[in-house]
Amino acid sequence: MSLSALAVAGGGSLAACGTPAAEQTTESCVSEDLSATEKVVNWSNWPAYIDRAFVERDGEDVNISPTLQDFEQSSGITVHYTADVNDNVEFFEKVRNQLAACETTERDLFVLTDWMAARMLDLGWLQKLDHANLPNVEANLAASLRAPAWDKNRDYSVPWQSGLTGIAYNADLTDEVRSFEELMTRSDLNGQITLLTEMRDTMLFMLLITGGDPEDFSDDEWGTALERLQQAVEDGHVRKFTGNNYLQDLTSGNIAACEAWSGDVILTQFDNPNIKFVVPEEGLALWSDNMVVPNKATHKTNAEKLMDYYYDPTVAATVSAWVNYICPVSGAREAMEKVDRSLVDNPLIFPDEAMLAQTSSFMSLDETTARRYETDFQQVSGG
């Protein structure tokens, strides 16, 4: 498999509670761009998903993003950055009522995983981007990411990062966890693991360990995988299901191992080298996150300038050196020679074909099936 697998993310959609959300159209929900007079961008992103550094201000150490600071200084645009996307479905619930009613979310930019971005696009909740404001994106977007099935011309989305889902464990508490099968069965891990609230991440691995193909499976295979998960929950083997906050439990010793995203773990290792990331014997999950502008965002042009800034290869390499996710920007690997030469051959940032051959993506789902599967999963996970 090549990185083009990232482009097959489905246009499937769901509503977490099983109730369809209200659709909008360009005609029914008109947005006004105030970028010319209001030099602001309100950006919602995931935790630990941008470069950070401490600087001294007024005698105190302040945690900032150097790339964001450079953007603000060069553009004159102030960025209000909030790390409030902990889980795709959870974030969907935060903003669904406003977007369904064509009301402002008070955000100009979201970062959402491809299937959730596709969901919002299907509902008519996203503004079309002006590619005239995106010259760096046009020039430097990786070829494998240019035409996803759900947004073939990238009219509504720009990739932020891509990444891998595997296993993390705390070496102070347990031996290496080599496979997802081990994670789900080893007696010493009973009650000491967490899984992700992201249905597609967790069920991809459950399908793999029950003999299904996560890229092409039947309802019966789905049912078998779900039953296996339910048994593990009923047996008390799974402590809980989490969003991006699983690392708190892992580093504090509340759990011994978990399903995890690659970049989170690599970043944590700077402070705690005993937190290990494993490529499970079954393989890895491959995914992509995307920058999108919601309806009623009033600073779309400013948001486009911000997107384009992050497609400068040096800026992209600077972010990747901190977050350790797969970089979507062509030329960033060459730029990494100056940013941090030790990362030029890091397979978690610039994976080779051998690494990508171990990955799977989750099958595209239509709206009805996606809603049904999500309901099934939530009944088991307690979501």
Image (tube, helix red, strand yellow):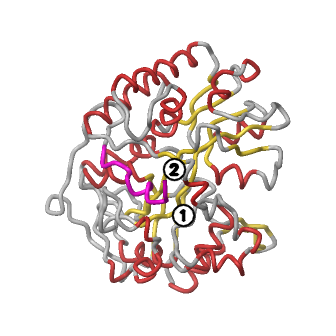
What amino acid type should be assigned to the residue bearing mark 1?
Tyr
Is residue 232 a member of the stretch shown in magenta? no
Q: Nearer the viewer, residue 167 or 255?
A: 167
Q: Relative to 50, say whether 241 is above or below.
A: above
Crowding near pointer 2: few (<14 within 10 Å), some, many (20+)? Answer: many
- The residue that appears at 70% across and 49% down in the rendered structure is 265
2 vs 1, front mark: 2
Name the residue beneath numbered marker 1. 81
- Residue lying at the far right in this picture: please name it: 172
Q: Position of residue 223 (x, y in %)?
A: 40, 21
- Residue lying at the far bottom in this picture: please name it: 74
- The residue that appears at 49% across and 51% down in the rendered structure is 287
Q: Where is residue 300 in the image (x, y as percent from the top left)?
A: 35, 72
Q: Position of residue 159 (x, y in %)?
A: 45, 64
Q: How far apart are marks 2 and 1 (CA)?
A: 26 Å
- The residue that appears at 47% across and 71% down in the rendered structure is 142
Q: Left or right of 159: which side holds 163?
A: right
Range of the magenta residues?
1-12
Q: Left or right of 24: which side holds 148?
A: right
Name the residue beneath numbered marker 2. 286
What amino acid type should be assigned to the residue bearing mark 2?
Leu
- Residue lying at the far top in this picture: please name it: 235
